Image (tube, grey):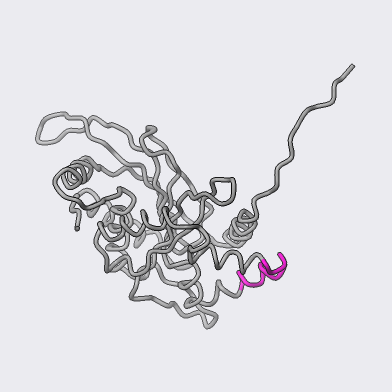
């Protein structure tokens, strides 16, 4: 005699509806992806020294955001949006959308925050902004307030809103930023890359950290490498410019300069 299966029913988190809508809209984009490894031994050592010798708070994610926004500042086609007239809009400010985990009700949810003008901020300023956003009441978060208003609209209308935003660069910048930097939550877990359903012209996914044996100055040594995934909207960015951009970001990260 089969016994009835036991189960529990939980309420679907309201904030996840916004994520589902966003992913549906992202599927319309023609994305190309590139996965690389970057030597981060120098920067991790520099961050340890700064934390030991100063009172400045430095986050590794803040450093990556700083490096990406610096590279975009020098090559602004990478965060261009296309408007309804088929023109490309290239903003002076690099607004980076970053995902953080926060307590929403009784659940831990991944929500977005936007670092405005990241190309004009130091690593320390970006890091402090991330920490402050994590610690403040979720109801005070700019993005969370916008999501609550958005979810008050019926689902079919929300999809129309996304189609409108897709051709409205100024509104996209205001509501979603111009670049996405996110984490696959694999930091320290060995080699691993995340491949996102990308939403922006440029999306960078932080993956795992792995030790590699490399040759330096005719000697072999152990170095830490970070796994990164770069995703580009192929309607706007071609493969060759994307490859040059990735090389530039790699160089900036490996330089290891931490501005405070």
Q: Give the farthest residue toward the bottom.
A: 85
Name the spot of residue 195 as percent of width and height, x first. 48, 47
Q: Is residue 92 above or below residue 243?
A: below
* Quadrant hosting residue 204: bottom left
Please report the residue visible at 50 percent of the width from the left and 70 percent of the height from the top.
Answer: 175
Q: Is residue 62 above or below residue 106?
A: below
Please report the residue visible at 31 percent of the width from the left and 53 percent of the height from the top.
Answer: 64
- Nearer to me, 166 or 188: 188
* Quadrant hosting residue 147: bottom right
- Magenta segment includes 159: yes
* Quadrant hosting residue 210: top left
- Magenta segment includes 202: no
Q: Total of numbered circles in the picture?
A: 0
Q: Give the farthest residue toward the top.
A: 1
Q: Is residue 9 above or below residue 69?
A: above
- Nearer to me, 94 or 30: 94
User: Where is the C terminus found, in terms of image quarters?
Assistant: bottom left
Q: Give the farthest residue toward the left.
A: 217
Q: Give the farthest residue toward the front.
A: 137
Please report the residue visible at 38 percent of the width from the left and 64 percent of the height from the top.
Answer: 115
**Image: magenta residue range:** 152-163
Name the spot of residue 128 as percent of width and height, x first. 31, 57
- Nearer to me, 109 or 192: 109
Judge left or right: residue 245 versus residue 257.
Answer: right
Judge left or right: residue 100 versus residue 228.
Answer: right
Name the spot of residue 32 as percent of width and height, x first. 47, 55
- Magenta segment main secondary structure: helix
């Amino acid at each position: 005699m089969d016994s009835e299966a036991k189960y529990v029913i939980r309420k679907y988190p309201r904030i996840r509806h916004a994520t589902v809508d966003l992913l549906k809209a992202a599927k319309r984009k023609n994305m190309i992806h590139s996965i690389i490894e970057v030597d981060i031994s120098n920067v991790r050592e520099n961050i340890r020294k700064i934390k030991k010798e100063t009172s400045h708070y430095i986050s590794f994610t803040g450093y990556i955001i700083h490096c990406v926004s610096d590279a975009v500042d020098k090559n602004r086609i990478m965060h261009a949006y296309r408007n309804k007239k088929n023109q490309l809009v290239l903003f002076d400010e690099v607004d980076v959308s970053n995902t953080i985990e926060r307590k929403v009700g009784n659940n831990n949810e991944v929500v977005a925050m936007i670092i405005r003008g990241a190309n004009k901020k130091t690593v320390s300023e970006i890091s402090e902004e991330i920490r402050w956003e994590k610690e403040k009441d979720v109801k005070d978060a700019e993005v969370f307030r916008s999501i609550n208003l958005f979810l008050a609209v019926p689902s079919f209308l929300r999809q129309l809103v996304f189609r409108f935003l897709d051709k409205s660069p100024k509104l996209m910048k205001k509501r979603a930023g111009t670049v996405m930097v996110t984490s696959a939550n694999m930091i320290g877990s060995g080699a691993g890359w995340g491949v996102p359903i990308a939403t922006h012209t440029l999306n960078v996914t932080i993956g795992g950290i792995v030790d590699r044996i490399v040759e330096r100055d005719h000697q072999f040594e152990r170095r830490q490498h970070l796994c990164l995934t770069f995703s580009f909207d192929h309607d706007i960015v071609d493969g060759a410019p994307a490859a040059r951009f990735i090389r530039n970001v790699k160089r900036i990260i490996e330089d290891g300069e931490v501005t405070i």
